[in-house]
Image (spheres, rainbow, N blue to C red):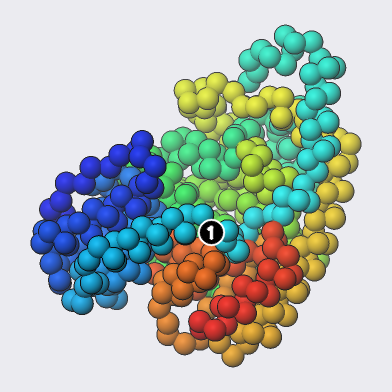
Amino acid sequence: MLRPWPLEIQLDKKSDKAIYLQIADAVIDAIKTGKLVSGNALPGSRQLAELLKVNRNTVVEALDVLIAEGWLITIDRKGTFVTQSLPQINHDAENKKDQKIKIEESKSFLVFDDGLPDSRLAPMNDLARAYRELFSRKSRWQIMGYSSELGNLEFRKSIAQMLNFKRGMSISYDQICITRGSQMAMYLASHCILKSGDFVLVENPGYKPAWEAFENAGATLLPVNVNSDGLDIDQVEKYLEKHSGIKAIYVTPHHQFPTTVTLSLKKRLKLIGLSNQYNFTIIEDDYDNEFHFGQRPILPISSYSVLKNYIYIGTFSKIVAPALRIGYLASSHENIQKIGNHRKIIDVQGDNIMEEAILNLINEGKIKRHLKKANLVYKNKRDYFESLLNQYLKDKITFTKPEGGLAFWIVPKEEIDVLEVFEKLKSQGIQIMSPNRFSFDETIKGFRLGYASLSEKQMEEGISVLSKLL
């Protein structure tokens, strides 16, 4: 069993030094002064994050640095320990470390993100024009006053129409709340249906920012494995038989994050049946529904009329640009009323002007034309990325060509230390998502590589380097 954390670490949030580096330096100092010695076990990242009052991802980054520099070592199924063979401790090493940090902070990375769109394709000129016209066309009192906490009425009507016609749903505008991005939607949903002591089932691997929202509401997470056809429904059923307090399940069924797999029809129907039987809510995050290259996108689980309890989350950030924080959620009238009441506590209303500007682009057909153009570009990029994987990594990885979304999921055939590969790529100026960023406890042996924002030259450069490390 891991011993309690014995050190007092003072973090200075006003310092120029990043928090994860402050944590890493504190651990190194503890090793140098003998407070920690070779073989000592450290608590897990979750416990450390709670003790230090920081995001768990910050702790993971600090541990990644300490492992890469040789201060710590991870042992599967046992934990993280101070290494037996410590780095040489001298002033030269300290100076080199400081130089390395400065170089890394200023280095321009080739970034395989988690599947972000190419902002250069975004209709920003059209959006800026629409935004400016609102100021000149309307009286100041019309655009500067407060509006509904649920969002612009006409914008909600437009989204309801889109969901009904394109995604097979049957909802009205008063079942929709506009949010500042999908993360805010996740937070509002969590505080609407969850309380301390509740359980939430989550995909593993999965989307950690959503997990953090559920934990913030007081819930305990239960991880469910993801197979080639999506969520392990048998495992879901076992959890339901064991725990009486399961209130929700969070899923990304269209293009699962991070593996990109699609939840099969058989499993969708089974999940709906279990939701109705055990009275838990399906929180469906349809984060990139618009980017699908097959015949037609799979309809959301929330579109099935027999489903009683659902919260459906979507976003415009992927459609236009990541910096555009406009998301939405759809649910029952009762849930939306609760969500609206909570929204008023943290944010009286959203960006009413931006909502109207986007509405103008929708009504003018510009969003539709943008998506048509973007999907063609991304489909070509996906096909080229697939050719690179076959050219450089065919004998080293397994992968399935995704039908949609803006990323690939690749799994090394050989047993390798994926975190070591992550660090080696970083040292060569190539950044990917650390596998710890979507792993529940044990590190998942796979990589999510976003391709949409990269040029063909950048794709080939990155895959060529990765091939030498696998």
Instruction: Determine whether 16 is above or below 298 in the image.
Output: above
Residue 432 position within the rendered picture, expressed as x and y whole percent measured from the top left = 53, 65
The picture places residue 226, in percent across and down from the top left corner, at 50, 69
Viewer-nearest residue: 290 or 278: 290
- x then y, percent, for residue 86: 21, 73
Give 308 or 459, whichever is nearer the viewer.
459
Label 1 residue SS: loop
Question: Which residue sits at x=10%, y=62%?
Answer: 34
- Location of residue 86 with respect to 338 vertically, above or below: below
Image point 79% across, 35% down: which residue? 127
- Is residue 97 visible to the viewer in this orientation of the structure? yes
Question: 282 or 446, which is in the foreground?
Answer: 446
Which image quarter: residue 182?
A: top right
Residue occupying image coordinates x 39% and y 42%: 16
Q: Is residue 333 above or below residue 452?
A: above
On the rendered structure, is 461 left or right of 137?
left
The quarter of the image holding the N terminus is bottom left
Residue 469 position in % (x across, y down): 50, 82
Picture layout, residue 141 above or below residue 436:
above
Is residue 341 visible from the viewing direction of this image?
A: no
Q: Quadrant of residue 254?
A: bottom right
Quarter where residue 133 is shown? top right
Q: Mark 1 highlights which residue? A: 107
- Kindly identify the amino acid type of the residue bearing the numbered disc 1: Lys
